[in-house]
Amino acid sequence: MPVHPLADQAATLRRETLTFLRTPLGQEVWSWLMAQGHSFTMPASWSARARSHQAESLVAAESKRVADGMTFAMDSDLIQAARTVGQDQSIPLPFTADVLPAPSGMLAFSRQDPLMTIGPHPVIAATWGPPMDGFGPGVHLTWWTAMPEEAQEPDAAARGRLIPMNPDFDLHLSFLPRIDTRLLQPNKELSSGLLYSAVPLRTVVAAWYALTADTTTLSEQRPQAAVTQALKELKAKKRGVQVATTPDADTTHRDITERAAQKMSAAGDPDDWFKPSPEFAATSKKVSHGVFDPALDHQLDAGHRRIAHIYREAAAHWHRLETQANQKYPGIFANLEELRAREHKDWQPWCWVPSRLVSAYLKAKYDTPPRTALWDGARIAALGAWRNGGRHSILTTMPLQETAGDRAPVNLPTTMPAPGLGMVIDDNGTIHLLLACLDDVSDHGPADAELLLTSNYGDPAGMLEDITKLTLFLTGDDLLDAVRTTQAYYDDAAAVNSGKRPRSATDAETAQHTYSMQLFTGLLASICAPGADLLDAGALTGRKLPATWPPQPNILSEMTLWLLAHPPETP
């Protein structure tokens, strides 16, 4: 079989890329890019890893996508059509699974005829594959620019140090009904953070449309035997190259636009799609430590270094949960903020969004199984309330017994200064992180308000699915009675739902649970008491002006930590 030039070109780039990714040089490049501030899309669980381990995992994932997927090349007319559609932002490009030419793959180009250019840099490849762990339906996509020849090390190829291309941008791209606004809206309607990647993303998707167009012909072609052998030694699968051709660019352009229009029509009203919305204090790609940056720890005494360490552990944990929630349910917080803006009059003002509505939203909009939606609904309700209130968290320096009490905190709906608050408990070196919010249960519970607490139980690496919840109906005066009321309600609900009544807690078990609850409810009541005296922990470093309590909504994405040094005076 004669060698096809496009197949040989694509397979050679695949071989060079796999060789690069399989050597220590690949990890060096990723580590260097991350040190320069480049952000890569990765599972939230990886955020707790050292940067070198993150780089190792990212390179391994990219190597697997290149090794396992199919390889594609396009003739010049197809490339021209994809470029034209990609640059014309008046053409919406809905993304569905059937647009992909393969579940995973590599689309290869040349420096002379790239997919497009970003500044002076030609885009010579796109790679894609299944979503990374924790992400919703869609694909992980990376596009790559050619490494400038003058930037290569001397004799790079001979020394095994050749860098064939650089990862320019990567992302998780969701299938409909979730829509990436870059595929739907022109630049003037996009937020500034999306402008850089908008046209490249559209152009890659347009190339996928072109590859799967009815008028496109795909034929498997072979590269030179030496390239095929090298790919075999690299354990690459599907070593042939799918070469795509078209009668002419205009035909492909027409096919892309007509098919995209059909998908738009079939998808219904775009206003019903799940589009990410701009929001204040959105979850940042990286956790921010602000004045508690570890590089500045040497300026602090031992006590303040301990506070800085606690801040970073708490901020990293809650940032990881926010990130995981957004990966599992793309746009969830922005979508729930929109729901709240539309329907907040349907529930009490002290509740961000009732957890039952969050669970229902997960089931309806994300096709989440009922049991998962029930648990994640409470977790996301607590996170959302905390975010909405400004990400304020309180570290107590007192033993919990000092603020514990046997009264039910029924005044929280009038005294809680934010929809949600974080509580940070330093238990002999183990940091317990809790979120507290109020849930409107007036339509189905024995009280109007239910206190919802979520806790990591001292596990700094805990993920969303590891977070437990505690609830308490705010009724009566005695905490023990409120605990009994709460237990009885959920026992009755379990009996209705399962047809079998669970074993009731013994008096000793109820007393033990009440004791545990009073440690948390007492602390929260002290934080929210009118006479509470809380200090801005960041201001104690001398690096910022002190904020005043009660807290205000925060337009920044970083957490604010407060110190409760003594209980409020009893009036």
Image: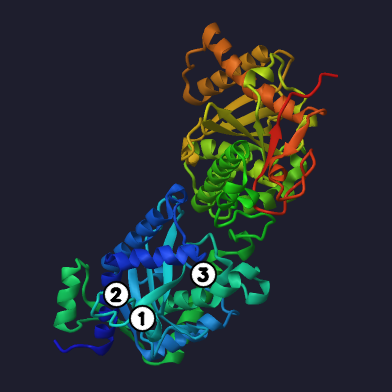
Q: Amino acid at mark 3?
A: Pro
Q: CA distance from mark 2 to mark 3?
A: 40 Å
The residue lying toward the viewer, choosing from 459 and 567, is: 567
Is label 2 in contact with label 1 (beta carbons under 8 Å)?
yes
* Residue indicated by mark 3: 94
Q: Compared with residue 26, is residue 347 higher up or lower down, i.e. above or below?
A: above
The residue lying toward the viewer, choosing from 26 and 256, is: 26
The N terminus, quarter of image: bottom left
SS label for mark 1: loop
- How crowded pointer 1 is (Cα within 10 Å; few <14, some 14-19, many 20+) is rated as some
The residue lying toward the viewer, choosing from 505 and 164, is: 164
Q: Amino acid at mark 2?
A: Arg
- How crowded pointer 2 is (Cα within 10 Å; few <14, some 14-19, many 20+) is rated as some
SS label for mark 2: loop
Front of the two marks 2 and 3: 2
Q: Quadrant of residue 562?
A: top right
Q: Amino acid at mark 1?
A: Gln
Q: Is residue 5 visible?
A: yes
Residue 395 is left or right of residue 249, and the answer is right
Q: Quadrant of residue 213?
A: bottom left
SS label for mark 3: loop
Mark found first going from the N terminus, 2 or 3: 3
* Residue indicated by mark 1: 152
Mark found first going from the N terminus, 3 or 1: 3
Q: CA distance from mark 2 to mark 1?
A: 8 Å
Q: Compared with residue 406, is residue 179 higher up or lower down, i.e. above or below?
A: below
* Residue indicated by mark 2: 161
Give me the residue at 55% from left, 30% from top.
Answer: 469
- Image spot of residue 389 (x, y percent): 71, 44
